[in-house]
Image (cartoon, helix red, strand yellow):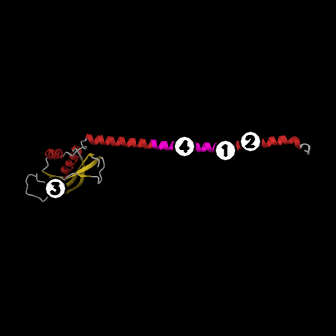
Amino acid sequence: MKIGSDDLPKLQLSLLAALIMMAIGAGIVYLSLSLIKTAKLEQAAAQAERNDFDGKLNRVRSEEDEIRKKSAMFHKLQARGMVGEEQRLEWVELLKEIRDRRRLLDLQYEIAPQRPLDATLGSGFAYYASNMKVQLKLLHEEDLTRLLDDLRQQARALIQIKSCNVSRLPRGGAEGGTAAQLQADCQIDWVTLHEVASK
């Protein structure tokens, strides 16, 4: 079957309908692609917002854990008596009690003024240290280790041994084996934590 010029007016309506349907189809495809692009952008924005919220939530949980740990540490220090003003009289009594209980031959000490451990202090709590020079005469090295262990366990401060030098004493004419054999010279920091006023 051949299409002649007489058939063109009859086909115009069909061709026009086909063109309109093609234009509508192209419009629908364009609109669909545009909606898909918008939906992807919205999804990416929602995912970014969710990631931001997840990050904030994780930071809050991390800060909460850190506060909980610091609080537990503070209560532990407080229970040990390390929070607050230093108790020098108590420290001296502890040294005398250890000297008597351990039957140490000679124990001398000198406590330096308290100093802040941090160069710059803000508000809140800060660590302070008092240096103590300890000199004692020993029958043997174990006397020194027992003294230091007793201090670490019983002192109402954090004990930090900075240095301990042990030297042999010259042989004397003491009888009965009770003469000191060694001398120890130690530098010990007594560390406490207490509140400082804001500047």
Look at discs 3 and 4 and give the one toward the viewer.
4
Q: Answer whether labels 4 and 2 touch (C-beta < 8 Å).
A: no
Q: Residue at x 58, y 43 (%)?
A: 42
Can residue 52 be found in the magenta stretch?
A: yes
Q: Is residue 64 left or right of residue 86?
A: right
Q: Is residue 139 visible?
A: no
Q: Residues within 10 Å of mark 2 (few under 14, many from 20)?
A: few
For marks 2 and 1, give the CA distance: 14 Å
Secondary structure that dominates the magenta span: helix
Q: Which mark is residue 24?
A: 2
Q: Is residue 197 magenta?
A: no
Q: Which mark is residue 183?
A: 3
Name the residue that disc number 1 marks: 33
Residue 47: give its label: 4
For the record, the magenta segment spans: 30-57
Q: Residues within 10 Å of mark 1 (few under 14, many from 20)?
A: few
Q: Amino acid at mark 2?
A: Ile
- Kindly identify which numbered label has been placed on residue 167: none
Could you give the CA–CA distance between mark 3 and mark 1, rounded to whole angstroms? Answer: 90 Å
Q: Residue at x 42, y 42 (%)?
A: 60
Q: In the image, which is nearer the foreground, mark 3 or mark 2?
A: 2
What is the secondary structure assignment of the residue under circle 3?
A: strand
Q: How many angstroms separate mark 3 from mark 4 (CA)?
A: 70 Å
| Disc nearer the start of the sequence (3/1) | 1
Nearer mark to the viewer, of 4 and 2: 2
Going from N to C along the chain, the mark reached first, 3 or 4, is 4
Q: Nearer the viewer, residue 122 or 179?
A: 122
Asked whether the residues under the numbered discs 3 and 4 touch, taking CB atoms below 8 Å apart as contact, a structural biologist would say no
**Which of marks 2 and 4 precedes in the sequence?**
2
Residue 97, image x, y percentages? 15, 44
Which callout, 4 or 1, points at the residue further toward the start of the chain? 1
